[in-house]
Image: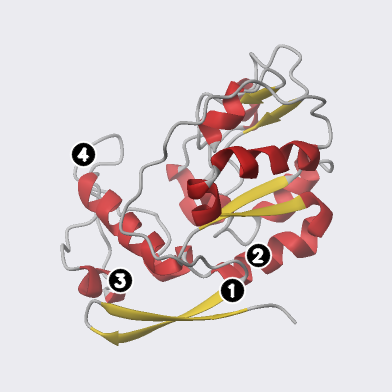
Amino acid sequence: MYSYLNEHPQIYMSPKKEPQFFAGDVLGHQRNVIAVEDYRRCFDRADGARVVGEASTAYMVSRIAAEQIKSYNPSARILVMLRNPIDVMHALHSKRLFMNMEHITDFGKAITCDDARLWRAGRWKGQPIIRPSYREVASFPAQLKRFTNVFGRDRFHVVAYDDFRSDPATEYAKLLPFSAWIQRQAEISFGTMQTGAFATWLLRIGCEIHQVSSGALRAQCYLPK
């Protein structure tokens, strides 16, 4: 979605895809951008774009990000893409293994282990890795509630990952009225999205995750009343 939005001539997305500026309670000093001056520089080249944005994933987990974003820009609109929470945790585990942020290769053991992980290289080498747990990342109900409470449903748009994967052009088109300022749709090339081992359903509102056995998870989902 970030790439498609960035192709629109009236939209400017920060080249630093995930500044994580407003997630200080989650990532601390290990955010990609810490100073507000550096955050503003992420949009230096917007050149009169009608909409500017970025794609920090940690904001959903943060307990303060929604309020801070609203304070920084009261007219901000929030776009969230949700995926099966079990798939989210599996993907995050694979990513952390690849980036040397996780040393436990067994998924079931990794998500239940509370031991600190240490950076093995880079500017924070030897320091504990400051990242939310797997379950925290996939705890969507509380995350959604925080943002809807702050922004209201008219400024908070949820995209189902499976819907976007199967028909990206249609889901993309729905975002343009949501952005409020986009006047026309650009010529965007939508290629075939990669399909992985994803479930055929996607969490849209909330889900409770239960561990059945080591490595096995069950998701109990519900719809709003």
Q: Quadrant of the C terminus?
A: bottom right
Instruction: Please tell me whether mark 4 sits on a helix, a strand or a loop.
Output: loop
CA distance separating discs 3 and 1: 20 Å
Instruction: State which mark lies toward you, 4 or 3.
Output: 3
Q: Residue 192 versus residue 212: which sits nearer the camera?
A: 192
Residue 76: give x, y in percent of width and height: 77, 42
CA distance separating discs 4 and 1: 36 Å
Q: For mark 3, does the 10 Å Cα neighbourhood hold few (<14), some (14 to 19), or many (20 or more) residues?
A: some
Which comes before the other along the chain, label 2 or label 4?
4
Residue 215 higher or lower than 130, as above or below: below
Residue 124 higher or lower than 158, as above or below: above
Residue 186: give x, y in percent of width and height: 68, 22
Which comes before the other along the chain, label 4 or label 1?
4
- Give the side of residue 49 with respect to residue 61, left or right: right
Of all residues shown, which one is farthest toward the bottom? 212
Question: Which amino acid does the dot numbered 3 rest on?
Answer: Ile
Residue at image mark 2: 144
Which comes before the other along the chain, label 1 or label 2?
2
Query: Measuring 29% from the left and 58% from the top, which residue is drawn there?
Result: 93
Residue 143: give x, y in percent of width and height: 61, 65
Which comes before the other along the chain, label 3 or label 1?
3
Query: Measuring 54% from the left and 38% from the top, which residue is drawn there?
Result: 1
Residue at image mark 3: 111
Q: Residue 37 versus residue 94: which sits nearer the camera?
A: 94
Q: Are marks 1 and 2 in contact (CB under 8 Å)?
A: yes
Residue 64: give x, y in percent of width and height: 65, 57
* Residue 206 numbered tag: 1
Which comes before the other along the chain, label 3 or label 2?
3
- Give the side of residue 117 with respect to residue 84, left or right: left
Residue 108 higher or lower than 152, as above or below: below
Q: Are marks 4 and 1 in contact (CB under 8 Å)?
A: no
